[in-house]
Amino acid sequence: MPSTANPAAPERQYPLRMPSGWVAPVPAWKSTFADSVSSVSMCVIGFQHTPEIRVMGYLRELSAVLVNAAVCDFASSDAGQGMQETVCIAYWLDATKAQADLSCSVFKTMWSKHMAAEFGYGVFCESINVPFDRSETLFSGPVHAHGMSQSRLGVEGPIPHHQYWGGMRDRIPLAARDSLSQSDSLRIVEQSDTRVLVTAHENLCIIRSGQDWSQCDVQQLGEYRDTIEPILKAGMSFLRDHGEQVNCYSCRYMRDLNSDGTDVPRSFGLACFRTMKDLEDWAEHHPTHLAIFNTFLGIAQQHGPDLQLRLWHEVSVLPADGQWAEYVNCRPGTGWLGGI
Ligand code: HEM
């Protein structure tokens, strides 16, 4: 009898968590990228400010200098204690070009201009580079593309590895032979009264998990606003204010914005965990995500294939090298500083 095993596939050292014979109850898709691309770089450039201070113009200026970026998204969040964080999230499909944009003299000059404490706002820049074998994307439909997937080649699916706990890990190629659990401490590499530069430890885990209600009719929008959104907000507030209980260094619950600062009918949680295991544990066991998950499933079951809310996420588990974050005039505990 011929063997059905693929002789080219490397053996897994860590078994899949997908139950045997699993058939996902609803379909999902993942993004595919050109074979010539092996990593994505992502940079969150942000202002920490009070609501009266308008920063979209500054962000537009900064993002215009990132000429090689494939994507520039804008978004804003309530950072607690009366502060907001308004950001541009840029993605590049070439790490060298990301580096070139972020180190060019025009960008550096503009960045330095915002460092004066008397402006009354802080600035931060969180820069990561993710090999694709350490990341995964998941979409509830084959059409919507957000985050890094705005520069994807196509979609693959419906895929089998989802809708069970552990699906995220099963979708990350390197997790087949690496537990991705080794972690150390974030390192402060430069520090002054106003500025901190931090580098990552191995396996820092970043998730951007999004909700898109642009296709919802009045009834489904009402259901989203009245039932899911408040529970999502509570879960994101827990991670923002008490993240240390679950090894979450930072969480921003963000509203997407157009480049002129007007609202887009989408939101996302952008969170940074010590490791993927910590993120898994929160998603699978913590009452805040379980409440989001179960409320959503109740509504999704009522609507079946007519559900109009679109969900997506992208998850990255970082190698230690090449990841850094800079905070200037920001509150203690901002972003990755929440892990120090
Ligand atoms: C998984 C619902 C927000 C973290 C899931 C799954 C659903 C779900 C249905 C299973 C996905 C699949 O494998 O097919 C929701 C809904 C949300 C929401 C309805 C908002 C309205 C978030 C946010 C985060 C998050 C904001 C993190 C910041 C996770 C993680 C998993 C997951 C890490 C994967 C768990 C695993 O595969 O082990 N969620 N979620 N979710 N969610 Fe959420």
Image: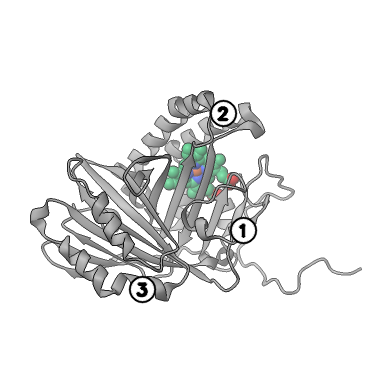
* The one of 71 and 329 positioned closer to us in this rendering: 71
Q: Earlier in the sequence, mark 1 or mark 3?
A: 3
Answer yes or no: disc 1 within 8 Å of ligand 1.
Answer: no
Q: Earlier in the sequence, mark 2 or mark 1?
A: 1
Residue 148 coordinates in the image, percent (x, y): 48, 58
Q: Is residue 26 above or below residue 7?
A: above
Q: Amino acid at mark 3?
A: Gln
Asked which secondary structure carries label 2, the reply is helix
Q: Amino acid at mark 1?
A: Gly
Query: Can the viewer see residue 19?
Result: yes
* The one of 193 and 182 positioned closer to us in this rendering: 193
How crowded pointer 1 is (Cα within 10 Å; few <14, some 14-19, many 20+) is rated as some
**Residue at image location 53% in from the left, 23% down from the top:** 219
Dot 1 corresponds to which residue?
154
Residue 326 coordinates in the image, percent (x, y): 25, 64
Dot 3 corresponds to which residue?
99
- Mark 1 touching mark 3, by CB under 8 A? no
Q: Earlier in the sequence, mark 2 or mark 3?
A: 3
Q: CA distance from mark 1 to mark 3?
A: 26 Å
Seen in the image, is 287 located left or right of residue 118? right
Asked which secondary structure carries label 1, the reply is strand
Q: Which mark is residue 250?
A: none
Q: Quadrant of residue 325?
A: bottom left
- Please name which of the two marks, 2 or 1, marks the residue nearer to the observer: 1
Dot 2 corresponds to which residue?
299
- Please name which of the two marks, 2 or 3, marks the residue nearer to the observer: 3
Seen in the image, is 132 located left or right of residue 160? left
Q: CA distance from mark 2 to mark 3?
A: 44 Å
Q: CA distance from mark 2 to mark 1?
A: 29 Å
Q: Is residue 91 above or below residue 307?
A: below
The colouring scheme, among rainbow, by chain, secondary structure or one colour, is one colour
Query: Can the viewer see residue 283?
Result: no
